[in-house]
Image (tube, rainbow, N blue to C red):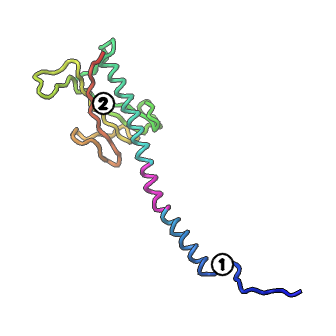
Amino acid sequence: MKTIRTNIPHGFSLVEITLAVAIASLAIITFLGLLPMGLEMSRKTSVSLSNSNIREQVVQNLDGMLWGDKNSNVPQLGTKKQLYFNEEGTQVPSGSADMTYLVEVEYRGPASLPKDTGTQTYLQRALIRIARTNSSSFQFPTTSSSSSGTMNGSNYTTFSYLFAKNR
């Protein structure tokens, strides 16, 4: 029996392998370049979620003190209270090793509406500052004009709240 030989090459050439490796390495380098941005975005989202949970707890507690059945717990005008929270947004005692957030709540008292001559007794104001720090001696800036920033390597955010009696 006769065998027929053909000149069809089997396998890949060196040029094809080189191109495939170059394309694959370009894709890997692109994905590795996106990784730090993704991690930073994930970290910012986590901090934002924790801030939101902490802020909601503080607002509910202050709202209960201002408009609850027993108004004896209403803070004095201008008083500042420090609270401590962990990474999950759960309140922890002062000096806890689990502390991640320092919260300062400043009661500003009755507020007035624009173009109103007097203060509204059913409208109260508070300033809430949240800092991502494990130091209980962190000092917030004295100006309340900035809503967020960095101080001594710690990120902080400032929220101003109006509480209205609606019951």
Farthest residue to the top: give it.
Answer: 69
- Residue drawn where x is 44% and y is 43% of the image: 46
- Residue drawn where x is 45% and y is 38% of the image: 87
Compute the Cα span from label 2 to label 1.
70 Å
- Going by the image, does 135 lie left or right of 141? right
Name the residue type under label 2: Val
Q: Element at badge 2? A: strand
- Going by the image, does 51 lie left or right of 127? right
Residue 102 versus residue 68 in the image, above or below: below
Point out residue 135 in the picture as x, y percentages from the top left corner: 38, 40
Q: Are marks 2 and 1 in contact (CB under 8 Å)?
A: no
Q: Quadrant of the N terminus?
A: bottom right
**Mark 2 or 1, nearer chain start:** 1
Name the residue type under label 1: Phe
Q: Residue 37 magenta-drawn?
A: yes
Write down the region rendered in magenta. 31-41
Of residue 24 and residue 101, the one placed in the foreground of this image is 24
Q: Quadrant of residue 155?
A: top left
Residue 136 versus residue 16 in the image, above or below: above
Would you call the spot at circle 1 few (<14 residues within 10 Å), some (14-19), or many (20 or more)? few
- Residue drawn where x is 33% and y is 23% of the image: 62
Q: Which mark is residue 105?
A: 2
- Residue located beneath label 1 in the image: 12
Would you call the spot at circle 2 few (<14 residues within 10 Å), some (14-19), or many (20 or more)? many
Q: Quadrant of the C terminus?
A: top left
Point out residue 154 in the picture as x, y percentages from the top left corner: 35, 46
Point out residue 66 in the picture as x, y percentages from the top left corner: 29, 19
Q: Nearer the viewer, mark 2 or mark 1?
A: 1
- Going by the image, does 72 lie left or right of 117? right
